Image (cartoon, helix red, strand yellow):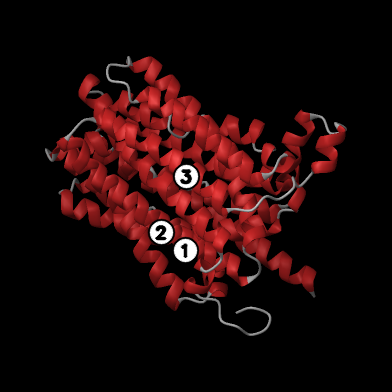
Amino acid sequence: MTRDGERVTFRSVLGVREFRAMWTAELLSIAGDQLARVALSVLVFQRTASAFLTGLTYALTFVPALVGGILLSSLGDRYPRRDVMVVADLVRAVLVGFMAVPGVPLWPLCTLVAVVTLLNGPFKAAQHALLPDVLSGSKYTVGMAIRNITNQLAQLLGFAGGGALVSAINPSVGLALNAATFLLSAVVLRRGVGHRPAAIQRAASSGRMPFLASTTAGARVVWRDPALRVLLALCWLAGFYITPEALAAPYADSLETGALGVGLIMASDPLGSVIGGIVFGRWVPEHQQVRVIGVLGILAGVPLVFCALQPGLVTSMALFAIAGALATPYTIQGTASYTRKLPDAQRAQGSGLLSSGLITIQGLGALAAGVFADLVGPAHAIALAGLTGAIVAVPIAVGWRRAKRSAIEESR
């Protein structure tokens, strides 16, 4: 509800032109990224037959974003946020175009993947910082829900369609399509989002703010706020729950399902996330979602534990979908609460810390999953990740409960 009593709906939020442009651009990029991840997983596993190298390559689509998020996210505060997003898209389109060249050796390919991922940091920081300016009040929360549901659908189509496409054609074609999505995203953002001055334009133009100091300001804001620290840790639980996607190729190989099975396994979590977003968004009030996000962080790991029983493809997909459905509400509410608490001048930096840290944690989780999969097999590696994630989530849930109680006492 808005302040004047008007009910905020998906339709009214999508009616905001700038949000619609950002939403469309994000869908294009996500669908292309997931298609590229399928192509890279299949390409590397075909060349090496190694779960470790497959996990390493998948990790490189996440880990370098930490450097980009920490060192480059301040660009979203120092310069117009729309322009930062457009430039990042254009550069990534060129780099992915080089990756699509047939016959590129493995290690140069991995280097290009790392650089592309590095640029994801400033893009996401600027995007998350700009969204509260485009959508105010309750529209922001609804917009976050729309992004989550439709982004998971884009991942679902990218993974499932990517598996079918890669099995029918060539991994290099999938990478070329990903480059095209970056170009389209840049065009949509440039034409659909209005220009806004930089959040710290005066400091940037006068040169009085050292670059290194500006890059650490957001981290200091987060570190000093217990609620922000807990929300950050809650969102970073995804590092454990990314394992099914990271091990999709060796897991599908153990089930003898081929490239199509890789895409279906990768699509299971996004499918569950769409279902979870619709169910919680429609029937569970926002204040109740906020109350239980810590518990949901624990429960999201439980379905993965059952992979220790080494189920078949359909059962595995169901388990991964349930895990995704449980993770969706805490992801939406955790991110929204975190972003709202950040001051505007450090919003891109704080958002960059969240998004780049999340991507990095997911990458490290993928790398660790590859190591354990070579030792104990992909099914047991996924089960171990789910169990560990659920255990780690317990103190986070306790910390969130304490943070809410402190906030209530301070408001009295």
Mark 2: which secondary structure? helix
Circles 1, 2 touching at the beta carbon (< 8 Å): yes
At x 23%, y 20%, the residue is 47
Q: Secondary structure at mark 1?
A: helix
Label 2 is placed on what type of residue?
A: Thr
Q: Which mark is residue 150?
A: 2
The kind of secondary structure element at disc 3 is helix
Q: Position of residue 205 (x, y in %)?
A: 83, 36
Please state which amino acid type lies under the numbered disc 1.
Ile
On the picture, is 356 further left or further right than 162?
right
Residue 412 falls left or right of residue 305? right
Q: Residue 272's quadrant in the figure?
A: bottom left
The front one of 277 and 117 is 117
User: Which of pointers 2 and 3 indicates the residue nearer the eye?
Assistant: 3
Residue for point 60% across, 79% down: 1
How far, Cα to Cα, is label 1 from label 3? 18 Å
- Kindly identify the amino acid type of the residue bearing the numbered disc 3: Ser
State the image coordinates of residue 306 (x, y, percent, origin top left).
Answer: 26, 51
**Could you say where residue 343 lies in the image, as x and y percent from the top left?**
75, 53
- In percent of width and height, residue 337 lies at 62, 60
Nearest to the eye among marks 1 and 3: give it.
3
Whole-number angstrom distance, CA of label 1 to CA of label 2: 6 Å
Category of crowding for the residue at label 1, using alpha-carbon neighbours closer than 10 angstroms: few (below 14), some (14–19), many (at least 20): many
Q: How many marks?
A: 3
Q: For mark 1, what is the residue? A: 146
Query: Do we see residue 359 in this rendering?
Result: yes
